[in-house]
Image: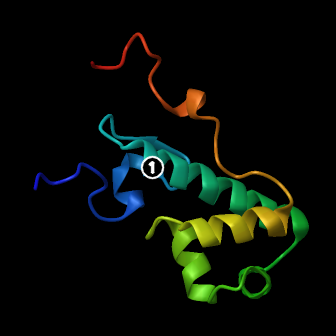
Amino acid sequence: MARRPGTRGEPRAYVVAGGSWPEGPFAADTPPEVRYAAAVASGLRAGLVELGLPNTTAAIRMGLARPSLQRILAGHVMPDLRSLAAAEVLLGRRLTPDPARLLPSPRTRES
């Protein structure tokens, strides 16, 4: 069976030298799921600051261990669907980005 293309290592590994997680900039070969993870981490971090929620309180309300939340925010792991749903419910807003903003236009995609 052929190996499925995807991420190699931590999501934050795709940030180019001089950049920072989750702002970027990202390497040209960054898979879409890493850009999604960055958008989720960025939105989650901003939402927690906006609400004045420390990571420990947020993790408890999300049903996560605090280290799990910190690993998502720091780009060490990809957020899973359960964590994403819990974060969106806690913040009362969508965290996933509009794919049109992250993906190449249809004219520039390889066929």
Q: Kindly give the residue lying farthest to the top in the view shown.
A: 107
**Percent coordinates x, y for residue 92 in the rendering:** 86, 60
Nearest the eye: 72 or 96: 96
Q: Kindly give the residue lying farthest to the front in the view shown.
A: 1
**Percent coordinates x, y for residue 83 in the rendering:** 63, 71
Residue under the point 62% across and 55% down: 40
* Apparent side of residue 33 relative to residue 65 in the rendered image (left or right): left
Residue under the point 70% across and 63% down: 45
Residue under the point 55% across and 82% down: 68
The quarter in which the C terminus is drawn is: top left
The quarter in which the N terminus is drawn is: bottom left
* Apparent side of residue 13 relative to residue 50 in the rendered image (left or right): left
Quarter of the image where one finds residue 44 = bottom right
Asked whether residue 49 is in view, the answer is no
**Percent coordinates x, y for residue 51 in the rendering:** 89, 67
Q: What residue type is labelled 1?
A: Glu
Nearest the eye: 64 or 14: 64
Asked whether residue 14 is in view, the answer is yes
Q: Kindly give the residue lying farthest to the left in the view shown.
A: 1
**Percent coordinates x, y for residue 66 in the rendering:** 63, 87
Nearest the eye: 43 or 16: 43
> For the residue carrying disc 1, how many other residues have a C-alpha within 10 Å: few (<14), some (14-19), or many (20+)?
some
* Apparent side of residue 51 relative to residue 44 in the rendered image (left or right): right
* Apparent side of residue 16 relative to residue 102 in the rendered image (left or right): left
Instruction: Look at mark 1 in the image and give the residue it sits on.
Output: 33
Colouring method of the image: rainbow
What count of labels does the image hold? 1
Report helix, strand or loop for mark 1.
helix
